[in-house]
Image: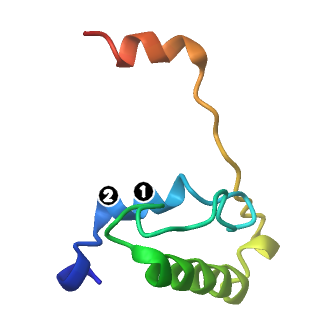
């Protein structure tokens, strides 16, 4: 996927912000969601394999919990100053 579509470090983060705590897409994947480099088939395959890994690695039984961290509203003006 890296050589063919350019999926690398930042594409993984693009995927991360499009899946929920249960590793399900928050919005139906399209050719451009989560990122055009993924495509529909690769994005769906990635999510399926991520769920298998989470289960096989017993992440839930080790106390690893996936949760979204909401940014504090007060940091946004600082980050996006012009």
Q: Is residue 51 above or below residue 11?
A: below
Instruction: Indicate the position of residue 68 as horizontal and vertical percent values.
Output: 67, 46
Residue beneath the point at 72% across and 58% down? 21
User: Does 33 appear above or below 60?
Assistant: above
Q: Is residue 65 left or right of residue 79?
A: right
How many numbered tags mark residues here?
2
Residue that appears at 66% across and 87% down: 52
Element carrying mark 2: helix
- Residue at point 48%, 77% (across, down): 40
Quarter of the image where one finds residue 63: bottom right
Residue 69 versus residue 26 in the image, above or below: above
Q: How is the image coloured?
A: rainbow
Q: In this orientation, which residue lies closer to the viewer: 68 or 59?
A: 68
In the rendering, at what x and y percent does residue 77 appear? Answer: 43, 10
Is 65 left, or right, of 42 in this rendering?
right
> Which residue is nearer to you in this view: 25 or 70?
25
Residue lying at the far front of the rendered structure: 31
Can you identify the residue that label 2 sits on? Answer: 10
Circles 1 and 2 in contact, beta carbons < 8 Å:
yes
Q: Position of residue 58 (x, y in %)?
A: 73, 82
Q: Quadrant of the N terminus?
A: bottom left
User: In this view of the protein, which residue sits in the foreground, 27 or 56?
Assistant: 27
User: Would you place residue 28 above or below residue 4 in this image?
Assistant: above
Which x, y percent locates residue 31? 42, 69
* Residue in the picture at 50% in, 68% down: 30
Q: CA distance from mark 1 to mark 2?
A: 5 Å
Q: Secondary structure at mark 1?
A: helix
In which quadrant is the C terminus drawn? top left
Residue reaching furthest to the right: 61
Determine which quarter of the picture holds residue 20.
bottom right
> Label 1: which residue?
13
């Amino acid at each position: 996927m890296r050589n063919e579509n350019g999926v690398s470090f930042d594409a993984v983060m693009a995927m991360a912000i499009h899946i929920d705590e249960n590793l399900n897409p928050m919005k139906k994947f399209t050719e451009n969601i989560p990122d055009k480099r993924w495509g529909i088939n690769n994005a769906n395959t990635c999510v399926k394999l991520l769920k298998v890994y989470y289960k096989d690695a017993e992440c839930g039984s080790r106390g690893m919990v996936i949760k979204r961290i909401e940014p504090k509203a007060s940091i946004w003006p600082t980050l996006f100053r012009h």
